Image: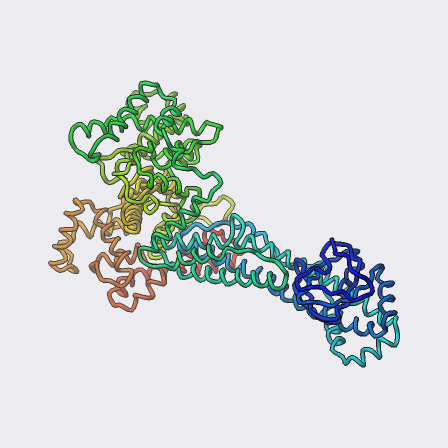
């Protein structure tokens, strides 16, 4: 509500006082005789001086569109306002020179407001392009590092600033020049005819109203950018912050991510300043939190790990459904009751777990401790299946202790310290893990099997589910009808997966088979579950890092076939990354369980890892991929896998191991060294290859000389480095000689495809995408 003003006389107004307030009735027009006035609205923030007529531009709306506030002590002459034409006549009647003064000061107002408009327009255009560019960079960096990036609909669906009508820039320039003319010229011209003056003034007022509309729209648009930039639940600032924190945690390169983060902070500060100074909008940014987050990313040493871990924990904990440690009380009882197993069975399991918890040395190898662990293992997997089955079919929200049990192997709050429980609750398992490999925890994996999207895994005897049923039928344990029924039985498949994959490998991934128990407990866990937690980001980051060295590790040659394509008997290279299954355990080992998941040669392999990995993740992934390369080649070659007449990775390497004593390229020292390597690997040719593959990836890729001439040539031929690495080390004669065969064969392939594509193009044949990708594979290799 406006304060009553004395009309047709001078009003004295103190600094800071509201003269006319936005939204109130436009009842007055005030001529500023002395002092300065601040004009404010969402989209406007400027100061004008003496000679300006306040409220004149608001009369057509009947209310003030902006707030006029005293920037200094003021002297203002107040006119009673009404309809615009009548108000102008009233003002001119008081003094005919006011016509020229009004045109001049309105021109100055146009100039000042146009400056605000252009600043907001430039900022809107700048920030739209900035968000698009940095979002693309964020996704590219995440893909490069193998870190999951968030999808940000607020940016993806963003449109550039658009106005229904364009401002007349020529008119803005005209009035800017007009306001700068000498006063005697203006007085002579506009004093000569009231009609001329009124025409100009009305035109100026309409232009000012358009400018106000555009400034308000620009300010609203800039405010809409604030959310996806740094304020909504999913915003670029938090996403980049999380990516850099994750990169630090997995020892990946953070330089590119930090560059985006620095640019974001600069742009947020710039946007805050523009909106506050030009549009009267205070974003109220918590700069202390931003400074703390930035410090967390740039600090070094031990404090870096602590602050980054704390930062990622904070992200995980800032969820609507926060769970306190107290809510895990009596978890064992709740889990057993939830399973709905017979009471005598659950009572026995509870007694055994409590007896285990009471052991002073939980790693003891005495007979009593061994017997107790055996009893727990026998009962654990039926319990796990019962709890999973109940949770899957339940329509109610899953209790937190049930979710933790199925995903991570949590069983009782009494088995873990409070610090470990807090870390367990802070783990973020919801990140999608988009990347080269699909990563599943055990709960997610069993759901894939149960719902038929994934076939059950092979058993420890290398039997898949169908082979197992055929063996059962062959030995007379089931009939033909029962076999057909069980082939489609979801419960039977679930039981097979838990019994033959989960149970067998659960112990193996722990790395402590003799003292293994299948649930989390303090003595069997590392000092920090958060640090050893294998997130889906970590898995894909480590695999992406390896693929930046061994480009073709997941590729295989397949026969191309399409019924509607005239191209037949053509081979194609297809990349099929394996699935990674995280078992609910703390451990030190990874397992390459299957190179294929069915009879089809383009089916996915399966890697198994403990959810809390206490070893060298980079080394573990190299070992898994080495075994994968060997087993995939062996499977693809069939019975010829070790036939030297048919060249392949396995046949050439097997020949090298079998006849190394006759190899003239090996000195006696190297032969003796290889002999010790074979003995250490227990005469397992695959494992000998894996040790060489580790050296190939970890050392030779950096130009180190660790392999002998024969192995280096085999590796260079079948496990080639990426082009970037080859170009770096090719100057060394040892590597140039080793890569000569690879370069010759790749050159032949490229010439062959160049010829084929010319023929297909000449015949007007549309080349399928798979063949184009294969040509590009050899061209880029």
Task: List x then y, in percent, for residue 578.
Answer: 37, 44
State the residue in front, 218 or 182: 182
* Res. 216 image quadrant: bottom right
Query: Could you say which quadrant of the image residue 579 lies in?
Result: top left
- Image coloring type: rainbow
Residue 654 lies left or right of residue 573; in this view the side is left
Residue 725 vs residue 119: left or right?
left
Residue 117 in view, yes or no: no
Which residue is rendered at x = 36% and y = 56% of the image? 252
Residue 502 sits above or below residue 530 on the image: above
Q: In the displayed structure, does residue 35 sit left or right of residue 262? A: right
Residue 202 lies, in percent from the top left, at 82, 66
In this view, the residue in front, 318 or 410, is: 318
Q: Which residue is drawn at 69% across and 64% down?
A: 14
> Can residue 711 be seen?
yes
Q: Is residue 735 left or right of residue 577?
A: left
Q: Quadrant of the C terminus?
A: bottom left
Q: Where is residue 162 in the image (x, y as percent from the top left)?
A: 66, 59
In x, y percent, where is residue 235? Answer: 51, 52
Q: As displayed, is residue 534 above or below residue 29?
A: above
């Amino acid at each position: 509500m406006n304060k009553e003003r004395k009309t047709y006389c001078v009003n004295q107004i103190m600094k800071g006082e509201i003269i006319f307030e936005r939204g109130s009735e436009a009842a007055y027009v005030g001529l500023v005789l002395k002092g300065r006035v601040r004009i404010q609205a969402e989209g406007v923030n400027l100061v004008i001086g003496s000679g300006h007529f306040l409220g004149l531009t608001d009369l057509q709306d009947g209310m003030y569109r902006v707030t006029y506030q005293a920037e200094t002590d003021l002297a203002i002459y107040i006119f009673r306002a009404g309809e615009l034409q009548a108000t102008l006549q009233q003002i001119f009647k008081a003094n005919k020179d006011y016509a020229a003064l009004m045109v001049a000061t309105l021109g100055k107002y146009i100039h000042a407001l146009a400056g605000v408009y252009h600043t907001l327009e430039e900022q809107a255009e700048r920030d739209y392009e900035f968000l698009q560019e940095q979002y693309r960079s964020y996704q590219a960096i995440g893909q490069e590092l193998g870190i999951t990036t968030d999808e940000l609909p607020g940016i993806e669906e963003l449109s550039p600033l658009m106005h229904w009508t364009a401002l007349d820039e020529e008119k803005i320039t005209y009035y800017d020049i007009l306001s700068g003319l000498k006063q005697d010229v203006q007085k002579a011209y506009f004093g000569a005819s009231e009609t001329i003056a009124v025409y100009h003034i009305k035109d100026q007022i309409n232009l000012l109203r358009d400018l106000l509309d555009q400034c308000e729209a620009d300010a609203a648009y800039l405010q809409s950018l604030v959310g996806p930039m740094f304020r909504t639940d999913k915003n670029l600032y938090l996403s980049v912050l999380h990516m850099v924190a994750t990169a630090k945690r997995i020892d990946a390169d953070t330089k590119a991510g930090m560059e985006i983060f620095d640019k974001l902070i600069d742009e947020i500060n710039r946007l805050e300043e523009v909106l506050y100074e030009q549009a009267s909008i205070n974003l109220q940014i918590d700069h202390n939190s931003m400074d703390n987050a930035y410090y967390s990313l740039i600090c070094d040493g031990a404090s870096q790990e602590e602050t980054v871990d704390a930062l990622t924990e904070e992200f995980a904990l800032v969820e609507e459904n926060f769970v306190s440690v107290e809510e895990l009380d009596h978890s064992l009882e709740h889990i057993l009751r939830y399973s709905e197993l017979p009471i005598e069975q659950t009572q026995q399991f509870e007694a055994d777990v409590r007896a285990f918890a009471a052991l002073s040395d939980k790693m003891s190898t005495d007979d009593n401790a061994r017997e107790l662990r055996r009893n727990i293992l026998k009962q654990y997997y039926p319990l796990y299946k019962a709890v999973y089955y109940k949770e899957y079919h339940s329509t109610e929200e899953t209790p937190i202790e049930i979710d933790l049990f199925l995903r991570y192997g949590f069983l009782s709050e009494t088995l873990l310290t409070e610090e470990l429980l807090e870390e367990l609750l802070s783990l973020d398992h919801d990140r999608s893990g988009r990347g080269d490999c699909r990563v599943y925890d055990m709960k997610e994996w069993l759901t894939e099997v149960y719902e038929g999207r994934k076939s059950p895994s092979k058993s420890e005897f290398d039997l898949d589910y169908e082979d197992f049923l055929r063996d059962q039928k062959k030995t007379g344990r089931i009939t033909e009808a029962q076999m057909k029924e069980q082939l489609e039985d979801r419960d039977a498949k679930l039981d097979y997966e838990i019994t033959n994959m989960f149970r067998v490998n659960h112990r193996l991934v722990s790395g402590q088979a003799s003292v293994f128990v299948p649930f989390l407990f303090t003595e069997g866990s590392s000092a920090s579950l958060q640090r050893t937690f294998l997130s889906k980001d970590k898995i894909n980051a480590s695999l992406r890092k390896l693929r930046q060295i061994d480009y073709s590790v997941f590729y295989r040659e397949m026969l191309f076939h399409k019924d509607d394509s005239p191209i037949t008997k053509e081979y194609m290279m297809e990349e099929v990354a394996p699935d990674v299954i995280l078992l609910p355990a703390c451990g030190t080992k990874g397992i390459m369980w299957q190179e294929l998941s069915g009879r089809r040669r383009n089916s996915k392999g399966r890697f198994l890892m403990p959810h809390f990995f206490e070893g060298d993740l980079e080394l573990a992934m190299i070992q898994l991929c080495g075994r994968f390369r060997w087993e995939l080649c062996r499977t693809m070659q069939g019975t010829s896998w070790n036939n030297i007449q048919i060249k392949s990775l396995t046949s050439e390497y097997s020949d090298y191991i079998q006849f190394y004593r006759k190899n003239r390229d090996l000195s006696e020292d190297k032969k003796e060294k290889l002999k010790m390597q074979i003995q250490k690997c227990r005469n397992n040719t695959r494992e000998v290859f894996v040790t060489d593959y580790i050296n190939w990836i970890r050392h030779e890729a950096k130009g180190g000389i660790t392999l002998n001439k024969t192995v280096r040539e085999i590796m260079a031929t079948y496990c080639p480095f990426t082009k970037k690495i080859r170009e770096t080390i090719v100057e060394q004669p040892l590597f140039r000689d080793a890569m000569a065969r690879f370069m010759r064969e790749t050159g032949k392939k490229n010439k062959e495809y160049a010829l084929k594509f010319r023929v297909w193009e000449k015949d007007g044949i549309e080349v399928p995408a798979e063949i184009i990708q294969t040509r590009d594979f050899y061209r880029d290799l």
